[in-house]
Amino acid sequence: MDSKQPNGTSKVTLADIARDCGVSVATVSLVLRNKSGVGSETRQRVYDSARALGYIQKVSNQARVHGLPRNIGLIVKVMPNGSPTTNSFYGPVLAGIEAVCRHGQINLVYATLPVDPGNHPLEIPRLLLEQHVDGVLMVGMCLDTKIVQMLRSQDLPVVLVDAYAVDDPFDSVVIENYAGAYRAVMHLIEAGHRQIAIVGSSPESYPSIMERRKGYFQALSDKGLEPIFGDCPLYPDEVLPVIPDLLNTHPGVTGILACNDDVAIATIRMAQKLGRRVPENLSVIGFDDILLAQHVMPPLTTMGVDMMGMGRLAAQLLLNRFAFPEAGGVRAVIRPKLVLRESVQPVR
């Protein structure tokens, strides 16, 4: 509840107001938090003193009372040598969040959080420790028990964006990954492909990628086909050495599901270096529909995700949580759609 005078030269505390009014600090706190239990005359005296001394109430306190946030924290995962602003998926998500905040004249306090290869945070975000925000959007990470407990103890409204937490205690916006991957594999099957591999996943993958892996497996199982796994982390550089081994070990593979578009593009380039023509004798389908997907050769068939819409929806969910703090938990699901281009064609 501390504040500075308008000229920023000194700090007015609750104790200063209490001494000026001749009341207790607890009484001042009740008045400034608009709580009951204080007479109208004393209440007015506290208000007059606070105004005369130049006290400015902390915005976040009022935000929680009236559902009017002024400062929203945006915490985005980042690999040790990476940048989320250049991430082909999260860039549009952040743009959608920013659009809602700009429209609502809400300050967006931006921070990155280093994560390990499993997308688990490597440290506690300073933004949470300093407590300068009214609510938080957490993007692209798995929150462990320690961070979940910290967020809950601070009573901060939280929305997870393509993120996951122990015990699932927060509102979230996620992708319908299982159904999207299932649809992608069925598209390959409908085009006559029977030996279909998946690259860019592993049994230890991030939850969203595990859901895509399960959707892939289920589609093949439903058609009586055998899975072919090209296991590797979800990074283009990691898939490059996997493709030669995959195609040598399984020369009959005619279709590949890549777990995101960056991996799909890397797969196409490596396959072409190996003499495989895409899509003439190898079809590749991606996931996400990043901007680059339509500009590669051949243009990439993929499962499109409304990434900006995902960001907008996350910001709106956070505003809803401010306005209705006791509302039931919400899990919003973004449904991907098949985007047909030229990297998939029927088996000859």
Image (tube, grey):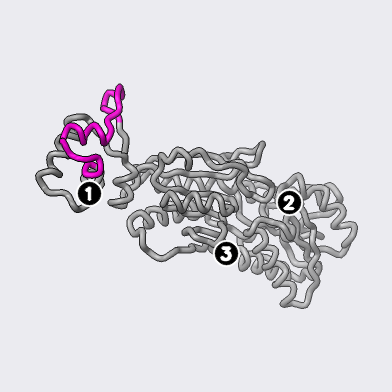
Label 2 close to label 1 by CB (< 8 Å): no
Tell us which disc is closer to us: 2 or 1: 1
Residue placed under numbered mark 2 in the picture = 233
Side of 155 where 195 appears, left or right: right
Q: Residue at x 21, y 40 (%)?
A: 24
Tell us which disc is closer to us: 1 or 3: 1
Residue 25 image offset from top left, x and y in percent: 25, 40
Give above or below for 194 relative to 172: below
Q: Name the amino acid type tagged 1.
A: Asn
Secondary element under disc 2, as helix, strand or loop, is loop
Side of 44 where 152 appears, left or right: right
Q: Residue furthest left?
A: 41
Task: Read off the magenta span.
Answer: 4-28
Q: Nearer the viewer, residue 123 or 134?
A: 123
- C-alpha separation, residue under disc 3 versus residue under disc 2: 20 Å
Q: First in sequence, mark 3 or 2: give its number.
A: 3
Crowd class of label 3 (few under 14; some 14 to 19; many from 20; radius 10 Å): some
Q: Residue at x 39, y 46 (%)?
A: 134
Residue placed under numbered mark 3 in the picture = 176
Q: Name the amino acid type tagged 2.
A: Pro
